[in-house]
Amino acid sequence: MATAALRARSTVDARFARQPEIAAGLHLSLATAFVQRGQYDEGRRSFGLADAAWRRAGLQNSSAAARGRLLHARAEAMSAQPGGLDAARTLLAAERRRLGPAADRGMLGFHVAQAEAVIGFFGDLDAANAAFSRALAIAGTRPEGLSERDVLLVRQQQAVVLMRLGRPGEALPALEAVVADRERTLGPGQSGTLIARQNLIQARLMTGDVDRSLAEADALLPVMIERFGETNRYTLALQSTRYEALTALGRYAEAVGAAEAVWKGSEASQGPGAHQTLGGLNDLGAVLCRAGDRRQGLRHLDQAYRTVREGFGEDYDLTHVIRFYLGECLVLDGRYDEAKQLLGQVDRAKVGALVGDASWGVMLDLALAEVALAERDAGTVRRLTPLLAGLSSPRTPPFERRRYAAVVAALT
């Protein structure tokens, strides 16, 4: 299908040379299809061809052309490729200037709010949540052209933001309702329904229902592979959920396979420097360190850390995540001086926001306590130990629970 789409694109402008408006619509449909498949470079080319066709038709200021540019902005943000977020912001700002007051009402206002929310998802979660709420408020005015599928997508995306904000208890019933509504109106096998189920499984995991989330993820995975392919970003997101569940259960050998699938699949479909690729490489390195293969784990983490800094900068959320796991693996490897330097640069708030866990900072405190223990800094160990009490919970993964017990035992 991908080959057929590329072949079709090469003939569109010639076949519809006298009907550029039709050509624009076809290019936009192809762009959307490429984005859904995670082929962002091809999607980007098709968005450009659509915009050029609207210009040839003299319709560059039409609602259809504006919608196409807003979809392009969303796709750039979703690509999570270096420069993608800046490109999305530039496209959105230009469209807001072009639309003026129309950017806050009607169908175009809905698309503007949705684009702002998707961009905010990668930089300002509160702004993303507010923008999704604004989109739903506009939807309540029933603008012409708005479909139930449009509204369901925004409800679903807002629930994902709630998870990232550390509010999975709110996201879970919202996603259960979205899945039920999608199955009722669009069918259980429709692509959007499958993606919503993947989001629902992630919410179950975040609320502590690990066994059920893993069982549902294992059942859904072959369906996602058949529908989207092994390297599609939604299939890989489900693999990431499986990775998190498997590590929570201490099943590290199986988690290695899930992390490797995310890394290699993302690299093949999105490129070696994409956010999802680097997240998979980080997870692979981290779980190898937990499984005792620290040499290989550190090699992957070093590669991920170098690439994320080059592509996204020192202060990007994922940079802080990878910085932490590299530092943690150095702790496990007994390289405390190097670990301390890295861990001291980790922004716990940014990591917590990216993983959707406001209490994530306890993991940083655990690693710092281990460094202090190695340095025989009893005062720092005593100061940090009370902050680690939550790690004694049965819900804490076995690996972290054992490390916490070792800190407490050494202190006493």
Image (cartoon, grey):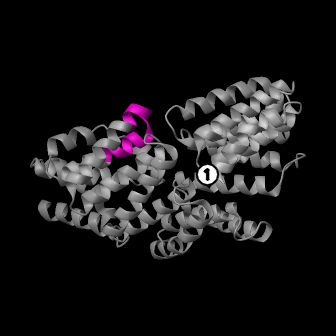
- Relative image position of residue 101 (x, y in whole percent): 82, 28
In the image, 370: left or right of 73? Answer: left
Q: Amino acid at mark 1?
A: Arg
Res 104 seen here: no
Q: Quadrant of the N terminus?
A: bottom right
Q: Residue at x 17, y 49 (%)?
A: 371
Rendered location of residue 259, percent (x, y): 39, 58
Task: Say which element carries label 1.
Answer: loop
Quadrant into which the C terminus falls? bottom left
Q: Is residue 137 visible?
A: yes
Q: Which residues are magenta?
A: 308-324
Q: Is residue 371 left or right of residue 124?
A: left
Magenta stretch contains residue 410? no
Residue 47, picture quadrant: top right
Image spot of residue 404 (x, y percent): 24, 62
> Main SS type for the magenta part?
helix
